[in-house]
Image: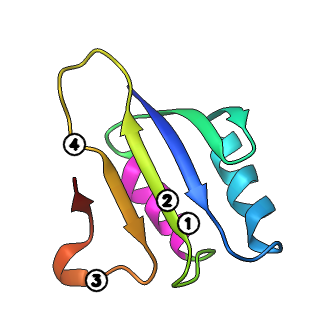
Amino acid sequence: MSQYLATYDIAEDRRRPRVSRLLANYGQRLQRSVFVIQLDHDDLPELRRELGGILAASDSIALVPVDDRGSRPTITWQRPVDTACAVRLI
């Protein structure tokens, strides 16, 4: 299980609570748009699929690894996801 700092920037008020409730299923809220979440390797595709049904083109999500499992890239994305580059690594 890996721990991530999940942050989001959601433009529309109606979508924001849906994203918040979804992320709360994976962890705990630290601030209004910041969560610490726990993900198994298999959880990431499911989370992306669930968020994909909510996010608009102007919205963004960032997952920053915060555990001690070595250095891993920050995962960010915006919707719609480009199928050629589903996850942009920073």
Q: Earlier in the sequence, mark 3 or mark 2?
A: 2
Residue 51: horizontal and vertical position, in percent? 55, 66
Which residue position is annotated with label 3? 82
The amino acid at mark 3 is Asp
Which residue position is annotated with label 4? 73
Left or right of residue 86, residue 13 in this image: right
Can you name the residue that lies furthest to the top here? 68
Determine whether the residue tagged by mark 4 lies in a helix, strand or loop: loop
Label 2 Cα neighbours within 10 Å, binned few <14 / some 14-19 / many ≥20:
many
Left or right of residue 9, residue 15 in this image: right
Disc number placed over residue 61 in the picture, else none: 2
Determine whether the residue tagged by mark 3 lies in a helix, strand or loop: loop
Whether the residues at callouts 2 and 4 have beta carbons within 8 Å, the answer is no
Whether the residues at callouts 2 and 1 have beta carbons within 8 Å, the answer is yes
Residue interval drawn in magenta: 44-52
Residue at (17% x, 27% y) in the render = 71
Callout in the foreground (2, 1)? 2
Residue 37: horizontal and vertical position, in percent? 54, 34
Separation (CA) of disc 3 from disc 2: 15 Å
